[in-house]
Image: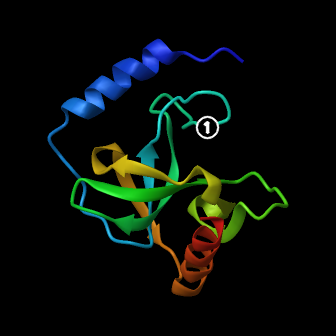
Amino acid sequence: MKKDFDNWNNEKKRIHETEENRFYKVREIWWCSIGLNVGFEEDGTSKEYQRPVLVLKGFSRQVCWAIPLTTSTKENPYHIKVGAIENNRESFAIISQLRLIDTKRFTDRLTILDEKIFETIRKAVRDLI
């Protein structure tokens, strides 16, 4: 499938020029303009190139570690079940895709993840490293 990097680049410029950083908290799940990426890196979908992400750790008002979520079911240690989120769709955290995110990329807060599930994900990330 051919990717439209030029269109994503225009969207990325618009996001970069935004003055607004979102206030977030650890354990929150946000819609995030994650972008159009190279190879097997997780892409966003729709014209805004968005997908839900889980905030794993905050570093400042501007940046945090976030983990992309997916509805694709895979049996491997890098996909951790988070449960049903938007539209009651079963979702999974792709811990191998952990990345630093500028909060300008956040658009809408979806929910806050259950503490027990969040701790399972944190442990899986620690074990990954």
Please tell me which residue is depicted at 39% across the width and 20% down the height of the picture.
Answer: 9
Measuring from the top left, give residue 44's x and y in whole percent. Answer: 54, 37
13 over 109 or under it: above or below = above
In this view, the residue in front, 51 or 66, is: 66
Residue extending furthest toward the front: 129
Measuring from the top left, give residue 21's x and y in whole percent. Answer: 21, 50
Please tell me which residue is depicted at 21% across the width and 60% down the height of the picture.
Answer: 61
In the image, taking residue 39 as reference, residue 58 lies left or right, namely: left
Q: Amino acid at mark 1?
A: Glu
Residue extending furthest toward the right: 75
Residue extending furthest toward the bottom: 116
Could you tell me which quadrant the N terminus lies in?
top right
In the image, taking residue 50 as reference, residue 63 lies left or right, namely: left
49 over 83 or under it: above or below = above
Could you tell me which quadrant the C terminus lies in?
bottom right
Measuring from the top left, give residue 48's x and y in whole percent. Answer: 44, 32
Q: How many labels sit on residues?
A: 1
Q: Crowding near pointer 1: few (<14 within 10 Å), some, many (20+)?
A: few
In this view, the residue in front, 50 or 64, is: 64
User: Which colouring convention does the figure follow?
Assistant: rainbow
In this view, the residue in front, 11 or 40, is: 40
In the image, taking residue 77 as reference, residue 4 lies left or right, namely: left
Please tell me which residue is depicted at 76% across the width and 65% down the height of the picture.
Answer: 77
User: Which structural element holds mark 1?
Assistant: loop
Measuring from the top left, give residue 123's x and y in whole percent. Answer: 60, 78
Please tell me which residue is depicted at 59% across the width and 27% down the height of the picture.
Answer: 38
11 over 90 or under it: above or below = above
> Would you name the residue on which mark 1 appears?
41
